[in-house]
Image (cartoon, rainbow, N blue to C red):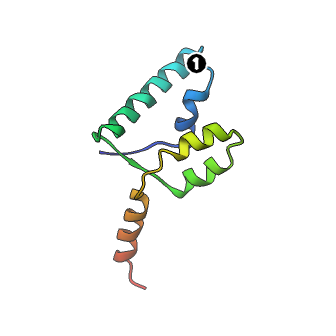
Amino acid sequence: MRVYLDNCTFNRPFDDQTQIRIKLETEAKLYIQEKIRDGTLELVWSYILDYENLANPFEERRNTIQNWKPALSLMWMLALKFLQRQTF
């Protein structure tokens, strides 16, 4: 199964974990990341994530999020499939 995590989701572990909702959302995000690491889920990346992440003023957070970008991004494969179906 393919999953897309938006920038807010990637940043959730850096938020105030004393709030129960934030803590639960963080735990869910970390569980999903575990499943991505073990191959159960496939992470989909987008140029929007790149764009938003570049605007992150916190270098450690920015680098941590960027490290999740798949080496051969599924985004490019999907874009290529889309373009192959188009007639110009």
Disc 1 residue crowd, few under 14, some 14–19, many 20+, Cα 10 Å: some
- In the image, residue 63 sits, relative to residue 70, either above or below, namely above
- In the image, residue 66 sits, relative to residue 58, either above or below, namely below
Return the residue at label 1.
17
Q: Nearer the viewer, residue 65 or 11?
A: 65
Q: Nearer the viewer, residue 9 or 63?
A: 63
Q: Nearer the viewer, residue 35 or 59?
A: 59
Find residue 4 and report its image quarter: top left
In the rendered image, residue 10, in percent from the top left (x then y), is placed at: 53, 37
Q: Amino acid at mark 1?
A: Gln
Seen at 58% across and 18% down, the residue is 17
Find residue 83 and report its image quarter: bottom left
Q: Is residue 38 left or right of residue 62?
A: left
Q: Secondary structure at mark 1?
A: loop
Find residue 64 and report its image quarter: top right
Query: In the rendered image, which quarter contains the N terminus?
Result: top left
Q: Nearer the viewer, residue 44 or 71?
A: 71
Q: Residue furthest bottom?
A: 88
Q: Is residue 32 left or right of residue 14?
A: left
Count the labels in the image: 1
Q: Residue furthest right?
A: 57
Seen at 67% across and 43% down, the residue is 56
In the rendered image, residue 18, in percent from the top left (x then y), is placed at: 60, 14
Q: Is residue 68 left or right of residue 62?
A: left
Query: In the rendered image, which quarter contains the C terminus?
Result: bottom left
In the rendered image, residue 2, in percent from the top left (x then y), is placed at: 34, 47
In the rendered image, residue 8, in percent from the top left (x then y), is placed at: 57, 37
Seen at 30% across and 37% down, the residue is 38
- In the image, residue 80 sits, relative to residue 50, either above or below, namely below
